[in-house]
Amino acid sequence: MNSGTPETRSMTHPLDSREGLSQLPSGTVLMNRYQIQDVVGIGGMGSVYRARDLHFPNVLKLVAVKEMINSAPDPLVRKTIVQNFEREANILVTLNHPAIPKIFDFFTFEERSYLVLEFINGLDLEAILKRSPEPIREDQMIIWAIEICDVLEYLHNHKPEPIIFRDVKPSNIMINQQNHVVVVDFGIAKVFKFGQKGTMIGTEGYSPPEQYRGEATPQTDVYALGATMHHLLTHRDPRLEAPFSFADRPIRSINSAVSPELELIVKTALQYKPEERFPTAAAMRDSLVLLAKKTGALSRVNSGSLLMKEQTVKPVWQFAFEDEIRGSATIERGILYAGAYDNNLYALDATKGQFLWKYPVNGGVISKPLIAEGQLLFGSEDGKLYSLQPATGRKNWEFTTGAPIRSSPKYSEGHVFFGSDDKNFYAVNITTNRKSWAIPTEGAIRSTPFLGTDLLYFGCESNEFVCADFRGQVKWRFWTKRPVTSSPIVAEGIVYFASLDGIFYALDAKSGWVVWRFRMGKGSISSPSISNDYVFVGSADGYIYCVERASAREIWRFKTDHQVSGSPLVYKDAIYCGSADGNFYCIDIKSGRQRWKYTTGGPITGTPTALNDVIYIGSADHNMYAFMA
Amino acid sequence: MAKFLEKLFKKDVQKKTHVDMIQTTPLTEEQLHPAGANQMTIRPAQLIIGCGQSVGLQRDHNEDALFTLTSVIADGHGDHPFGLVIVADGMGGHRNGEIASGVSARAVAKLVLNKIYSHFLDYQETPIDESIQEILEDSINEAQKAVVHYAPGGGTTLTIGLILGEQVTIGHVGDSRAYFIYSDGRLQKLTKDHSLVQRMVDLEEITEAEAMVHPQKNVLLKAIGQPEPFRPDIQTHQLPHGGKLLLCSDGLWGVVSELDIFRIINSEKDPILICNHLVEAANEAGGPDNISVILVDFSGI
């Protein structure tokens, strides 16, 4: 095969590059960032690797790196393929669903394009079926199928263009450690499948008749899901049978443990004519939910798939303190610091939840500890602010105020700022351990200050809200009708805080003018948090509110079963918040719908802390919990 | 204490030298122009407002109304720039269109000046117990009452910009528009047209381009003077640093593209001349409707 002429060279190019299909050796670092550890899968276009993200040197953050090798002989086609890849990757980046792996990055290097995704620790359904001599049990099949319908519905309703998955099959559905469905291998890989069988994509055996004519509609995915369920419930691989012959193999003739209802649902999904199938994935899910309720096989399922997910959420670890945890945790260098009503400040290993040390004081600790300039600072009900060595818990110094400290300390320019129940707001120099100044107010200060570049803000139990500069000069005061325990937050010249008078305020940060007021059902001591154009706050009326910052318009409200005195945490695309009903909630930031909840044994009043996809929250049931985000 | 003060001071000085030393990618011409214009720190912070109006080339009378006011009070408490700008585009038979736009602008200005501007003239500076957004909504309700009373059957759009310090609150009904022009070369539409075509665009029935030439592009879904109750859109934004606020009736945006609007604004420094050029551009494009334009330049904010 001598490639003498340009024609023959281009003819043989695919073969040449096939020789170059070598896998990346472990240890290879892509983009100075992703260190290849192992090959976890081989696809038609290249390999899938497990890699470590070196941007997180202190923790092991794993990602999946999917490699697609561009073997098109023609440079123009190659270029088009890379363009298509980038276009599809840009669409996938915008997807936001718990059953779709997040895309972190993509790039093209020479003839290889890479997609960096969330690493899913689990097995695909084909592997699960292979390991089991028995078909999948009906209960389990229904749960998974509902979740698959859920994600298909999400994709089909994608704007501006619906996304048709086109390749639903057992090997493209992963089950993660929490027993949830994650769909993998999006259309992205298919842009590299040039010239194979025309435009046909999808896997034989699972694809419906119309897909062979090049059509793809939501019913295409419904059919493929039916085919997948048929395979899992019968253990009979459709790729080994004649095409579209499911009707010849009724499920119950092979596996009599399956209910006639479920058989009917699968049969409906597998109708030859698209119009005789479920019109949408949502319709199929509704039938599955209805069946689950009716047979009682899934008493846990009561209103759709979202509720089921909460049941299976489990903490990564939990650690019991000796009394209630009312405050929030701080994490630094792998150590979690948190106080409790048992008069101790605890240090735990944040990854394992193991006890490292505790430091006893003379009162409960409800403020959030602070790490600044190599010191661990926290206030206590005993009226003192303590400074410890973060690694060992040995005391550096203490500063005494006249009453309990419930306000959490904040740091700026060599000073720690906090309020006390003795009605003073303090600035303490952390090198000399001396007070630089104090602002006297009319009431206890339990609100944690917000420190801006020129000004700082805090609320008082005496119904006042104070703005001061860093010399301790009050710039303006604002009076509400009830105490302000909520801690303020400032963004784009507006300061936001809630009051026990039932109003959520937005004031001009420079002048204190009221820009808007948002009325809640009851008073609030919850502290707001912000994500882009929205601000989130809890209230004693039991709701967590999402309010548009510019217009004060309510976007959604989420109902809990008791007062929300803790503060919502925005982390990635979700809100995490505890309630006095004892539940810890994960809420979708866009829709305001619950993703999961975890029930603890007591009210939750603290604010969650997040680091590296782990969320930490304490409960009055004495436990500190760590959850996967 | 002295040490603490010193530290604060030092920080400021360090910051400045630091900024000077930062190396950045070369700026585009567009970025350089406004950046150069704003290099000088202007104290006290103030607003420079220009406006322009024309009956257009195809109508025989003007049914648009505009209002502008700018003021500064600077004392020991700090700078308080204040600005109020209003564009109203009237419609209706007889003279009802021009009455509707005129009384609306007056009603809004009257209430806002009574409740907010008078606060600056009050030496005690007693706090206002209403929020800025509530006051602006009340003023729009006053405009509604005035139109029903003085111009029954008439209607008007109403777009208001109320600037207090670094924040601008926009009140809006109808299809006049407010835009931010950023110094880095972006034009951002702040208001959403309450029009049939905008609704169709939202429902993805037609495209933005189709909306511009749609036969029903003049049909409003919300206007001051309509018999059914409505809620105005009220929103507050931080002023873009070194940027501008543009208010205009559809006599401008309907015939001059956003790109051309942006180009004209950046071709000149004086807001009055800019408004003049914008009006000329609308007339050069045929001037099918009344044209009203207000440009607010935030200097030193």
Image: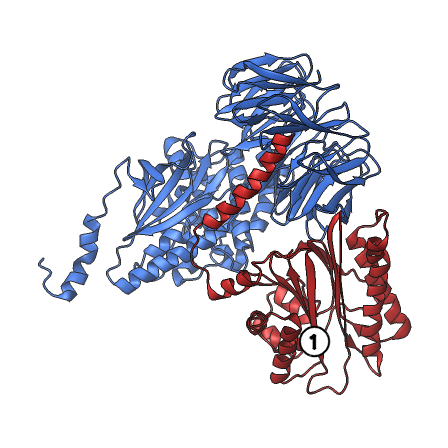
Quarter location, residue B6: top right
Other residues around mark 1 within 10 Å, as few (<14) / some (14–19) / many (≥20): many
Give whichever of A177, B201 is nearer the camera.
Answer: B201
Label 1: element kind = strand
Q: Position of residue B281 (x, y in %)?
A: 61, 80
Work out whether A461 lies above or below B149. above
Which quarter of the rendered picture does the N terminus of chain A lie within? bottom left
User: In the image, what residue occupies the spot 86% across and 52% down?
Assistant: B122
Give whichever of A345, A616 is nearer the camera.
Answer: A345
Give whichever of A90, A462 is nearer the camera.
Answer: A462
B86 sits left or right of A337 in the view: right
| Subunit bearing disc 1 | B
Q: Position of residue B280 (x, y in %)?
A: 63, 81
Per the rendering, the colour in which chain B appears is red
Which residue in the rendered view is the most extreme toward the right?
B149
Identify the image's colour scheme: rainbow, by chain, secondary structure or one colour: by chain
Question: What residue sits right under mark 1 in the picture?
Answer: B52
Quarter location, residue B66: bottom right
Instruction: Say whether residue A557 is visible.
Output: no
Per the rendering, the colour in which chain A appears is blue
Give whichever of A9, A345 is nearer the camera.
Answer: A345
Q: Position of residue A222 (x, y in %)?
A: 50, 51
